[in-house]
Image (cartoon, coloured by chain):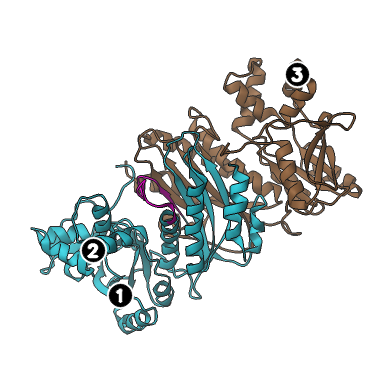
Chain colours: A cyan, B brown
């Protein structure tokens, strides 16, 4: 197996339609147009995905965590650069499976591969790592940042929260679910849905946005900190799937369970803020984007992010999001 | 140690001057202007650098291998995105050392960090991997590609060839050198010089260019293949440092030694082609860019790349460049 064969047979076909990729036969690519919104996320075996996860799902997760960042910024994705670091003993079929996953999501999200690097660890069993740099065009009104929230703004979140975290627990056999629930929860862990339509639809009036990857409260905290304000989230208003709702109902301490939901990562929903005067616009955007949006709190003076119970008292959230160096 | 502290303390200062980086406090960056030339290279502990290499040198090598790609394309570097995957047991001081290396070369090459991702292996001793995506503005005449060489063109290379490979052999104690030679050769392995000035100076008349990372003959072959032609390199005309020249003189078989020089990687010089009518322009560009340029062969009909002895007979080159999957 030769890296040039791999590039020619498996990755070059992913550049069809992207002239500036030069069929991966050059040192660099040309990306025409601009300005661009750019994001770069890496995923690591044993950290962001399970070592036994099928590599087509891993490829699609890599794409989706990056597309989710573009979605939160209201950007329209165009293409990406990819670096693969394979274990030394990787098989050709495994790389093919990975490339098939890329192809599937490229078609779905209408993006092209523009360039990258294919390498392998000298160590046979070293963990695979993948890094992608995605670029897209900003919305007409400019990229939605994390820092524009105003005191008094409503806080919204798309979709449902907690499924991916429960899916991971199901996969790791830390929690038991029915077969159907396990399948739907673990799918949410493996294949997050980048919220591109709603991200673009709210770009005109959202004051700030972030994708929920570290955990709802952690990411609300990032947004609040960037905006110099405080985010207060009503625990009971956090949207949950039926499976997650039943899981909460099964726990001894309801508030502790809701706090867990609010601390799970990997949901890749969009948390955003908008002035209260824009509530109708949010409803219209949600309908147009065919995406559920829930109002879950508000921006206040102060700092950090807090989870509140029905009486407005703060519910302690144990792990304030995932930390790679803890 | 917290990844957010690391980003704030060590990486955010590297974005000063790049407004679109939002101080690394957003999901994505904005890069203004365009079109852009973009390249992405990853480096891995134990493959592209030695596990004991000081991390400031590793950071600078990461920058330089990417800058070298932009140099070959005639582009002016602007900024980069960085993904770090640290071993699980990395120390704060080590990350600091890495960031210091980035800072040093940022100042030298006038580029800014725009974004990225900081993660760690769950496995304590897993090899560190770093991936960077660099972007720059193309030269006025458009990016120099690999595919524009014409039959009859001269082939040139900048600097000297073979030092980095001999430096690696010196570091791995496979070859013995004087203390001074070992220092200068290993410096060439650790700190390649991206040939930005000459890359820009030849952009107007070079028909094709590539940076020499896999090995002189291997990369000449890449260029020839992309151009649908053949590259013939005169072994004796390959420019060598004094130390490399002495190493060749010490070998039993001179042609075998020259073939080895032509197969080493990591030199990061630029190999380029230009019409014979442009020889004066090449001399002028070399002088303006203060970079040595040697004429080492010519482009012919046919395919592949060949190393020729003084009688025009092909010298066998054993390893046609580095291959990650061999």
Q: Is residue A168 magenta?
A: no
Residue A91 % position (x, y): 49, 43
Q: Residues within 10 Å of mark 1 (few under 14, many from 20)?
A: many
Q: Are marks 2 and 1 on the same chain?
A: yes
Residue drawn 61% across and 38% down?
B323
Give yes or no for contact between labels 2 and 1 (Cβ–Cβ under 8 Å): no
Q: Residues within 10 Å of mark 3 (few under 14, many from 20)?
A: few
For label 2, the SS is: helix
Q: Nearer the viewer, mark 3 or mark 2?
A: 2
Residue at mark 2: A181
Q: Is residue B254 above or below residue A86?
A: above
For label 3, the SS is: helix
Residue B246: mark: 3
Q: Which residues are magenta?
A: A41-56
Q: Is residue A278 shown to the viewer in this render?
A: yes
Q: Residues within 10 Å of mark 2 (few under 14, many from 20)?
A: some
Quarter of the image where one finds residue A277: bottom left
Q: Is residue A76 shown to the viewer in this render?
A: no
Residue at mark 1: A293
């Amino acid at each position: 197996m030769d890296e040039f064969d791999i590039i020619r047979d498996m990755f070059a076909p992913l550049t069809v339609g992207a002239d500036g990729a030069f069929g991966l036969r050059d040192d660099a690519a040309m990306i025409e147009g601009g300005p661009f919104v750019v994001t770069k996320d890496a995923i690591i075996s044993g950290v962001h995905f399970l070592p036994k996860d099928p590599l087509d799902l891993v490829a699609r997760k890599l794409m989706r965590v990056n597309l989710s960042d573009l979605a939160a910024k209201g950007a329209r994705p165009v293409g990406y650069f990819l670096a693969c670091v394979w274990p030394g003993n990787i098989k050709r079929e495994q790389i093919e499976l990975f490339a098939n996953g890329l192809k599937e999501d490229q078609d779905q999200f209408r993006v092209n591969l523009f360039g990258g690097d294919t390498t392998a660890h000298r160590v046979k069993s070293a963990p695979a790592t993948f890094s992608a740099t995605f670029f897209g065009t900003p919305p007409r009104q400019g990229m939605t940042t994390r820092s524009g929230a105003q005191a008094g703004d409503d806080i919204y979140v798309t979709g449902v929260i907690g499924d991916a975290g429960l899916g991971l627990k199901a996969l790791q056999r830390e929690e038991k679910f029915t077969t159907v629930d396990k399948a739907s929860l673990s799918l949410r862990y493996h294949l997050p849905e980048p919220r591109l339509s709603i991200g673009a639809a709210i770009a005109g009036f959202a004051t700030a946005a972030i994708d929920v990857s570290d955990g709802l409260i952690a990411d609300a905290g990032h947004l609040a900190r960037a905006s110099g304000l405080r985010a207060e989230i009503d625990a009971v208003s956090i949207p949950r799937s039926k499976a997650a709702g039943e899981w909460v109902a099964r726990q001894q301490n309801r508030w502790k369970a809701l706090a867990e939901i609010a601390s799970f990562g990997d949901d890749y929903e969009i948390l955003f803020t908008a002035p209260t005067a824009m509530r109708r616009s949010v409803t219209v955007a949600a309908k147009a984007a065919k995406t559920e949006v829930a109002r879950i709190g508000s921006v206040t003076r102060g700092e950090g992010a807090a989870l509140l119970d029905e009486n407005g008292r703060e519910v302690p959230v144990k792990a304030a999001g995932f930390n790679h160096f803890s």
